[in-house]
Structures are given as C-alpha cells and as structure tokens.
Amino acid sequence: MNTEHQPELGPVLIRLLKGVLYQERYPSQWQDLVRLQGPVRDYFKLIGLTLVIDEAEQYAFLRQDSEAGEAGDESLPRLVQRRPLGYPVSLLLVLLRKKLIELDAGGGETRLILSRAQIVDMLRVFLPESSNEAKIIDQIDRYINKLADYGFLRRLKGSSGQFEVHRIIKALVDSDWLSDFAARLTEYQEHASR
C-alpha cells in the first residue's frame, strides 16, 4: 500500500485565491504548491494572474499581470482591485519595512514582533501636531487595522496589543516602491510649502 502524500491542486488554488499562502500556517498546501508550481502557474496565467513564490521567506501570493485590465485591453478584465493606501498607511509600511531590514541585519530573531505602543511611537513623530492626542492615536489604530486587514500585520493571540510584521511586506515595499514613495513625498512637501 502506497502511503505517499499525493499533492492536490484544488486546495492550493483556493488558498491562493483567498490570500497569501504561508508555509507556517498551511504546511500541507505549501508542500503541494512547491510540487505543483507548473500547473498552478498555468492555471492562474489563464486569468491574468502571476504566482509569486518566495521560498526563502516561505510565502506565496498572486499578483495581477500588469497589462490586464489596462485602458484599451478588453480581452482580460482586471481581477484584483487596486487599493490606494494613502500617505499615513504608506509611511507606516515604509517604517515597518525599515524595522524588518534592521532585524535581518542584526541576525538572530526571524520574526518581527511589535507592540501597538511601539507602532504608535514610530508613526506619531511623522504626523502633524495636534491638541487632541486621543484623536491621533485613534487614527493610528485605524492605520494599523488597515494593514492587519491587508495581511501585512497579524495580531498575536493571547497577547494584547502585540503584532507580528509579515515578511510579505518585502514583496510590496521593494526598491521601486520606495523610489515612487520618495517622489510622492517630495510632491507632498512642495505642495505643503506653497
């Protein structure tokens, strides 16, 4: 009797359509994905999506092909909606990415865990002064919740106010993204100085 695990395509496809597939959370589906990369890529290519796998960081996700859904391209509508992040959320992403770089440079720990207070302190210095501190903190909580909803942060169970920064943030906040953000930041500064 053969007891070797047979990889299943269906659960892997569904997991990827639902969001990021992390090896740590879905080890069986991750193993199947690694073995079935070719068929998975072929399947999603038909609907204008590209499979991105980072085996070193142990996650995979789908990215919309850049041409799909662009103006004039009616053959394949855009499946994944673009979401504007706004300045504070983008800034928080940059700050979290910087923390990941510092963690990696230091060696040792592989998981970046931050308290809500640490995140608030990180972002607070970049926001305008206000006499209503509670309102500022509420805004920062909304930004944190937004990043948690998008899958960049995860609340740790059993510890109040602790968040794990997911390494998938590296896939979004790359050197191109940082360059675009720096250009937009310059535009904001020029606009504010008028």
Image (cartoon, helix red, strand yellow):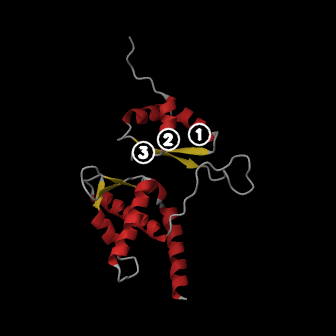
Which quadrant of the figure has residue 183?
bottom right
Q: In the rendered image, which residue does mark 3 sit on? A: 59
Q: Which mark is residue 16?
A: 2
Q: CA distance from mark 3 to mark 1?
A: 17 Å
- 141 relative to 64, above or below: below
Q: Quadrant of the N terminus?
A: top left
Q: Which mark is residue 91?
A: none
Q: CA distance from mark 2 to mark 3?
A: 10 Å
For the image shown, how many numbered marks are present on the structure? 3
Q: In the rendered image, which residue does mark 1 sit on? A: 44
- Position in image of residue 29 (x %, y %): 42, 34
The residue nearer to you, when weighing 73 against 173, is 73
**In front: mark 2 or mark 3?**
2
The residue nearer to you, when weighing 79 against 181, is 79
Q: Residue at x 44, y 69 (%)?
A: 91
What is the secondary structure assignment of the residue under circle 3? strand
Mark 1: which amino acid? Phe
Mark 3: which amino acid? Tyr
- Position in image of residue 165 (x %, y %): 35, 56
Q: Residue at x 38, y 62 (%)?
A: 144
